[in-house]
Amino acid sequence: MATFTISIPENLKKEIDEYPEINWAEYLKKRFEVRIKEFKKFEELKNSGKI
């Protein structure tokens, strides 16, 4: 599996740290998957002339 590193502002990191029960890496993986599906659907609609 590949590694993906991001930088976030300190204030956001502090807020994230307030919720240690959330698996943020897993959450982000799922959000990336959803967003990619959205982009693919948009491209499909654009290419078909529906938008």
Image: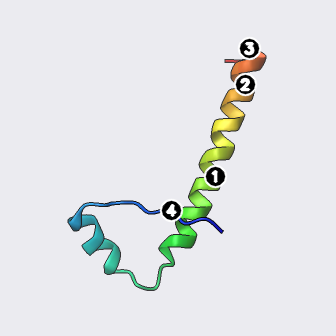
Density class for disc 4 (Cα within 10 Å; few <14, some 14-19, many ≥20) is few
Q: Nearer the viewer, residue 4 or 9?
A: 4
Q: Which residue is mark 1?
A: 34
Horizontal and vertical percent for residue 2?
A: 61, 65
SS category of the residue bearing label 3:
loop
Q: Which residue is mark 4?
A: 4
Cα separation, mark 2 vs mark 1, equals 17 Å
Cα separation, mark 4 vs mark 3, equals 35 Å
The residue located at (53%, 63%) in the rendering is: 28
Query: On residue 49, which mark appears?
Result: 3
Q: Which residue is mark 2?
A: 45
Horizontal and vertical percent for residue 14?
A: 25, 74
Q: Which amino acid, mark 1?
A: Val
Query: On residue 9, which mark appears?
Result: none
SS category of the residue bearing label 2:
helix
The residue located at (69%, 28%) in the rendering is: 43
Residue 49 horizontal side relative to residue 34, left or right? right
